[in-house]
Image (cartoon, rainbow, N blue to C red):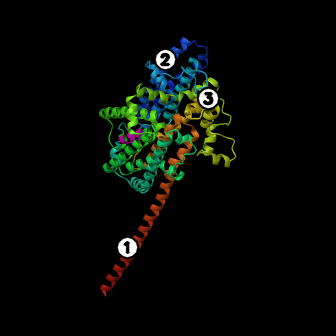
């Protein structure tokens, strides 16, 4: 019965995907012949279609998993916010100065026409649709209609959870100290030189590279302690306080978004393995999110002058625009990169396929490129510094990278493959935390890294997977191997002692008979 239900849902998704694909291939070339007034109407319609598509994705995933709050839905929400954020607000008639279509792109390029924006919207919409189709292809429902009581399972701590907890506790001091030391040094540099200088001023002396690599393990260690302890109340309190301090320090440095991905991951884990999040919690999170949005917008306004509490308060009081609206527009600015490619031609990158090179040179360092004698540059750096000729980073996205590699015709089919990958790293809804502990940890850590691909390049994400997921599991395997040997050695000693004790007892018994 369940298989029939799942197959019916998948068939409906297939029909919608096929219809969307046909519509895309019809509208994409024909959009060049629209008048400006017609183009404006189509942009408005497509903006609403994007909202409908996101709701459709979330609801169909809910039908397959029984849950709204999942790693997959978190990923897709960020995907739309970064690649379609401006269009979402346009649907409600909300516009701001300097939005897409009103000013030159990156100072030097022409103002995009309505036709350019339509083609960009179509590329994003078909990308989201094909990612979802790829993700549901192998998705299975649980064996029964009842969803796992994951919080009940995780509290029945298994040997795998115990080992994960011991490992996380063992490395936590050095990881936590590295994270806070890194933030403290960045705070001092940001106060002196400004936030932007942390990334574009070579004269700044930052923290040791080893410390920077260890900071990647901060979230994995927190997740390891939570799941490994079965969400013990003491550990939950300790982890959440620690993460709260981390958020405050990150905001003082000037980071407005990196910690937010981690917060969303922690919320999903809390919902799955500790306490379900109900309507009252959603209201609370909405209020908290609004406050953090105001703070983050204020931080952005002052971070190049040095962040302090007084400056942030003054910046909040001086805000002219709604910070929630401005935040969505800022996130949606990633769409500009894709628009540049639709305007100027998608096949502009002179160094070959970015995905193949991304796997080859991850982590992306100049030394590795030089050692391999590769005539190659990261597509993100090349696009910003050489193609656009700007000093700061323009950002990039998985949509733009698919487009620059495969063009608008083949892009949808490669997005299916990407959707399969997203399914693989977010598929934790029915995994048992007692028996599939490591698979769950792998999915959570990797999703926390890959969610950045909505606004970054592939070779950076590949490098971060090495620094984060692989680093964590390499250390864990070493620990588990050593721990297993220690237990085996202890068992052997106990066996020998038991054998000798038994032999002595037998000898005494025999002597007593005489």
Residue at image mark 2: 45
User: Does 211 appear above or below 277?
Assistant: below
Left or right relative to 335: residue 273:
left
Q: Position of residue 455 (x, y in %)?
A: 52, 34
Query: Which residue reaches farthest bottom?
Result: 514
Quadrant for residue 106, please give it. Answer: top right
Left or right relative to 215: residue 390:
right
Q: Nearer the viewer, residue 222 or 305?
A: 305
Q: Secondary structure at mark 2?
A: helix
Residue at image mark 1: 498
Q: Secondary structure at mark 1?
A: helix
Span highlighted in magenta in the image: 263-270
Of badges 2 and 1, nearer the viewer stands 2
Residue visible at 39% across and 74% down? Answer: 497
Left or right relative to 339: residue 187:
left
Residue visible at 54% across and 51% down? Answer: 209
10 Å neighbourhood of mark 1: few (<14), some, or many (≥20)?
Answer: few
10 Å neighbourhood of mark 2: few (<14), some, or many (≥20)?
Answer: some
User: Does 161 appear above or below 443?
Assistant: below
Residue visible at 61% across and 43% down? Answer: 359
Quadrant the C terminus occupies: bottom left
Q: CA distance from mark 1 to mark 3?
A: 69 Å
Dominant secondary structure of the residues highlighted in magenta in the image: helix
Residue at image mark 3: 410
Q: Position of residue 339 (x, y in %)?
A: 58, 25
Q: Position of residue 103 (x, y in %)?
A: 55, 21
Of badges 1 and 3, nearer the viewer stands 3
Q: Earlier in the sequence, mark 2 or mark 3?
A: 2
């Amino acid at each position: 019965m369940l298989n029939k239900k799942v197959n019916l849902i998948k068939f409906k998704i297939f029909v919608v995907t096929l219809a969307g694909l046909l519509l895309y291939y019809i509208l994409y070339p024909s959009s060049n012949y629209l008048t400006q007034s017609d183009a404006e109407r189509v942009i408005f319609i497509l903006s609403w279609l994007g909202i409908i598509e996101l709701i459709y994705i979330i609801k169909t995933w809910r039908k397959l998993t029984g849950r709204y709050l999942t790693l997959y839905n978190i990923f897709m929400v960020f995907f739309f916010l970064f690649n379609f954020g401006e269009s979402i607000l346009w649907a409600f008639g909300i516009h701001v100065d300097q939005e897409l279509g009103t000013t030159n792109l990156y100072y030097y390029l022409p103002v995009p026409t309505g036709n350019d924006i339509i083609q960009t919207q179509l590329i994003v919409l078909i990308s989201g649709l094909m990612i979802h189709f790829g993700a549901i292809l192998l998705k299975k429902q649980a064996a029964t209609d009842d969803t796992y009581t994951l919080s009940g399972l995780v509290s029945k701590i298994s040997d795998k959870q115990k080992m994960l907890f011991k490992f996380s506790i063992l490395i936590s001091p050095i990881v936590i100290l590295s994270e806070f030391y890194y933030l403290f040094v960045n705070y001092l540099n940001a106060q002196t030189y400004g936030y932007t200088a942390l990334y574009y001023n070579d004269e700044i002396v930052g923290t040791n590279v080893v410390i920077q690599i260890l900071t990647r393990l901060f979230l994995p260690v927190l997740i390891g302690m939570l799941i490994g302890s079965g969400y013990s109340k003491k550990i939950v309190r300790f982890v959440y306080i620690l993460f709260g301090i981390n958020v405050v320090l990150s905001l003082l440095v000037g980071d407005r978004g990196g910690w937010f991905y981690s917060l969303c991951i922690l919320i999903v884990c809390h919902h799955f393995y500790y306490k379900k999040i109900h309507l009252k919690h959603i209201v609370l999170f909405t209020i908290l999110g609004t406050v953090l949005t105001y703070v983050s917008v204020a931080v952005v306004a002052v971070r190049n002058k040095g962040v302090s509490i007084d400056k942030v308060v003054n910046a909040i009081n001086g805000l002219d625009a709604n910070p929630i609206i401005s935040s969505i527009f800022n996130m949606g600015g990633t769409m500009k990169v894709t628009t540049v490619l639709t305007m100027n031609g998608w096949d502009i990158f002179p160094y070959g396929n970015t995905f193949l090179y991304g796997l080859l040179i991850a982590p992306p360092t100049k030394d590795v490129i030089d050692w391999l004698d590769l005539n190659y540059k990261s597509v993100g750096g090349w696009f910003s510094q050489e193609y656009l000729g700007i000093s700061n980073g323009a950002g990039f996205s998985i949509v733009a990278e698919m487009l620059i590699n495969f063009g608008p015709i083949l892009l949808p089919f490669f997005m299916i493959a990407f959707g399969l990958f997203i399914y693989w790293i977010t598929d934790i809804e029915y995994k048992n935390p007692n028996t599939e502990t490591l698979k769950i940890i792998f999915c959570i850590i990797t999703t926390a890294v890959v969610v950045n691909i909505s606004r970054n390049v592939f070779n950076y994400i590949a490098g971060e997977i090495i620094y984060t997921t692989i680093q964590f599991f390499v250390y864990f395997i070493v620990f588990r191997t050593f721990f297993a040997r220690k237990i085996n050695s202890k068992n052997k000693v106990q066996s020998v002692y038991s054998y000798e004790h038994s032999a002595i007892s037998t000898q005494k018994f025999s002597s007593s008979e005489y």
